[in-house]
Amino acid sequence: IDRRSNIFYISDSSHHRILICKLTSNSSNQVQLQLQQVIGGGGGGEGGETGVAGYRDGSLDTALFHLPIGLTLHSNNQVLFVCDSLNHKIRSVNLITKTVETLFSFNTKKSLPWDCVFYSNSRTKRQTEKKEEEEEEERKEELFFTCANSHQIWVADISTKTAQRFCGSGVEAMKNHFNFKVVAFAQPSSICLGRDINNNNNNKTSF
C-alpha cells in the first residue's frame, strides 16, 4: 500500500499478474478500488487477456510472471519488489520508468520465494579528526524474503543484486537458537518488519 497516494498493489497470483488500484470514493461516499493498471498475465496493461504465465522483463505492458505472491514497496514508493515464485526469482517493478527487471535468481528450484519485506538500515559512524567528530550516514538497503519450501529466510542486497541465506537450517521443524543457521522453520510464508520500541537504538529490528 502506498498510503500517501492511496494506491494498492495486489497479487492476482492465479492469473500471474499484479493489479494496481486506487482507493476512491464516489458521490455517495462509498469507498471503492479503481483499477489503474495490470502488470503481467498477458493483458498488455489493460487486463484483457489474463492468466498467461511466463518470464519476461521489460515494459509493464509486456512483462510476464509465474505465480507472483509477495509484494513490498521501497521506502521511496517508486519501486515494487515481487516474489515471482514459480520463476524462482525476485523481480523489481520501477513505477517511474515503468519497467520490470530481475533483481535475483535462485540457482535451485528447491527455493520458492513467497513473501518479502524491504528494510533500510541507517546507522551513524563517528570519525575523529583534529579533535572534531563528524557523523556520516551509511545507508544499506536490503530485501528479506521467505522461502517456504526450503524453510528459510533469505536476504538480498539491493545495490549488488546478490542474496544469501539469512536464517533457517533448511530442516522443516520449529527450533529456536542464537545461531541463525541452526534455527528451524516449518514452511515460513509471511514476513513483516517491526521495531523494538523498548530499546533506545532505533535500528534494532525484528521480523
Image (tube, grey):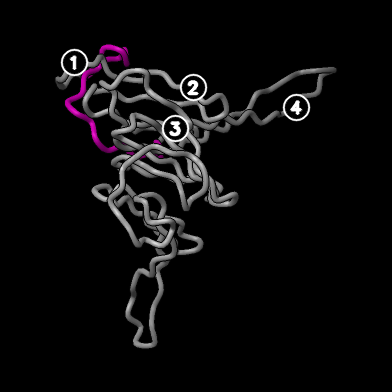
Q: Quadrant of the C terminus?
A: top left
Q: CA distance from mark 2 to mark 1?
A: 23 Å
Q: Are marks 3 and 4 in contact (CB under 8 Å)?
A: no
Looking at marks 4 and 2 on the same chain, the residue that comes earlier in the sequence is marked by 4
Residue 107 coordinates in the image, percent (x, y): 37, 18
Query: Which residue type does callout 1 highlight?
Result: Val
Looking at marks 3 and 1 on the same chain, the residue that comes earlier in the sequence is marked by 3
Q: What label does residue 143 carry, if any?
A: 3
Task: Give the SS element for disc 2.
Answer: strand
Q: CA distance from mark 2 to mark 3?
A: 10 Å
Q: What label does residue 171 carry, if any?
A: 1
Looking at marks 3 and 4 on the same chain, the residue that comes earlier in the sequence is marked by 4
Does the magenta segment cover residue 52?
no
Looking at marks 2 and 3 on the same chain, the residue that comes earlier in the sequence is marked by 3
Q: From the viewer's perspective, is residue 163 above or below residue 33?
A: above
**Residue marked by disc 4:** 134
Residue 53 coordinates in the image, percent (x, y): 31, 43
Along the line of sight, which residue is nearer the eye, 162 or 62? 62
Residue at position x 52%, y 48% in the image: 59
Q: Quadrant of the N terminus?
A: bottom left
**Residue marked by disc 2:** 162
Q: CA distance from mark 4 to mark 2?
A: 31 Å
Residue 203 coordinates in the image, percent (x, y): 49, 32
Query: Which residue type does callout 3 highlight?
Result: Leu
Label 4 neighbour load within 10 Å: few <14, some 14-19, many 20+: few
Q: What label does residue 94 carry, if any?
A: none
* Mark whose residue sits in front, 1 or 4: 1
* Mark whose residue sits in front, 2 or 1: 2
Q: Quadrant of residue 126?
A: top right
Along the line of sight, which residue is nearer the eye, 121 or 2? 2
